[in-house]
Image (spheres, rainbow, N blue to C red):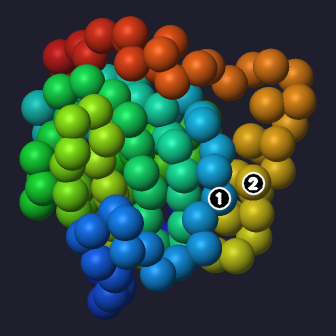
Amino acid sequence: MKHFGRKRSVTHTADPERRTRARANVLWPSKLATPATSQSVTLMDVSDVGAQIRGKRLPSPGEFVKLQMGSAAVFGTVKWHNGEDCGLQFDVRLAHDELEEFRRAATEARRFGLTPTPAQARNERPSRT
């Protein structure tokens, strides 16, 4: 997440069932911000070009967002929305080592029981900024 700014052309489908990239299942508590709101979400999985998140009252396709995961942040666009899930396309691809960092952190968090259940993650209320 060290690269921001210039948007690269990233090709992938908006259909969550037709993913073309390897994804890391992470179940990681995160913050999602739009120009109008900020809320807690659960990062369900992540690839080098995007992520799936779960939460309530998620932004609509086409909205610009900032996904904050601990001290790391990445900017992107909502590509699809289905109930309490939505897919994000990152403005800049994650480097391989950044993606591996998510995998390692998620594995350690699960090992120590530090990740929320999906039910706990859905119960957090969004806040206005």
Q: Secondary structure at mark 2?
A: helix
Q: As displayed, is residue 96 above or below residue 10?
A: above
Q: Quadrant of residue 90?
A: bottom left
Query: Could you tell me the amino acid type at mark 1?
Result: Ala
Query: Could you tell me the amino acid type at mark 2?
Result: Arg
> How many residues crowd around disc 2 within 10 Å: few (fewer than 14), some, or many (20 or more)?
some
Residue 18 percent coordinates (x, y): 37, 74
Q: Is residue 105 left or right of residue 1?
A: right
Q: Which residue is mark 2?
A: 103
* Mark sitting on residue 7: none
Q: As displayed, is residue 4 above or below residue 35?
A: below
Q: Secondary structure at mark 1?
A: strand
Q: Is residue 24 left or right of residue 14?
A: right
Q: As displayed, is residue 32 above or below residue 45?
A: above
Residue farthest to the front?
17
Q: Which callout, 2 or 1, points at the residue further toward the start of the chain?
A: 1
Residue 56 percent coordinates (x, y): 25, 24
Q: Which residue is mark 1?
A: 24
Please say whether residue 105 is visible from this viewpoint.
Answer: yes
